[in-house]
Amino acid sequence: MQEDIEHRSVSLAIRTSKLTAQALKNAISKYLAYRKNKRLGIGQAPDIVPQGKQTVKQLIGQNQGVSNIEVTEKNIKSFDRVARKYGVDYAVKKDRSVSPPKYLVFFKARDADALTAAFKEFTAKTLRKKERPSVRTKLTQFREMIKRPVADKTRHKEPQR
């Protein structure tokens, strides 16, 4: 009886800074996925395919064809949020041979339509930011308005005819 119970028990080791229900749930689900793959004869769990921003080597290693676009924008980091929204897998490479440096954005060939939509949204967002007046200029305008003498705010009632 004791030996039968020992064969059914599972020991699970988790390395975490704070043990939460979410961490325990993730560990158990990964263990169950491992057991399912082992039962099916797959052996190891399949490799995790990186998504979103990655290195050029990882992107080429997926064997899905790679295209690139040349970008001169310095603030390429803000493109990351829009690319994640559209689910684009991409890699950024800085070309330092030219002054100012150019950025090459590599992406999968199948993501071309999603990337063009992401770039349209990104450029529209940056144009909107440039059109907005800066907060400092607004503050200086308000300071000047305060310094101006205030017009007489007293109300005079005139008798009605």
Image (tube, rainbow, N blue to C red):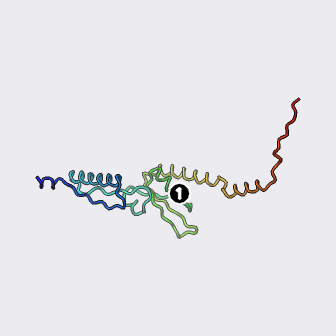
Residue 72 visible to an observer of this rendering = no
Give the residue displayed 23% in from the left and 53% down from the top. 35
Q: Which of 139 and 83 is in front in this view?
A: 139
Q: Where is residue 95 in the image (x, y as percent from the top left)?
A: 51, 67
Q: Which of 123 and 109 is in front in this view?
A: 123
Q: Which residue lies furthest to the bottom in this view?
A: 97
Q: Residue furthest top?
A: 161
51 displayed left or right of 24: right
Callout 1: 10 Å neighbours few (<14), some, many (20+)? few
- In the rendered image, which residue does mark 1 sit on? 78
Q: Position of residue 26 (x, y in %)?
A: 33, 53
> Which quadrant of the rendered structure holds the C terminus?
top right
Q: Nearer the viewer, residue 24 or 95?
A: 24
Q: What residue type is labelled 1?
A: Ser
Give the residue displayed 29% in from the left and 53% down from the top. 28
Give the residue displayed 57% in from the left and 53% down from the top. 123
Q: Position of residue 114 (x, y in %)?
A: 47, 49
Give the residue displayed 45% in from the left and 53% down from the top. 88
In the displayed structure, 99 sits above or below 122; it is: below
1 displayed left or right of 152: left
Q: Which of 40 and 35 is in front in this view?
A: 35
Q: Where is residue 50 in the image (x, y as percent from the top left)?
A: 38, 57
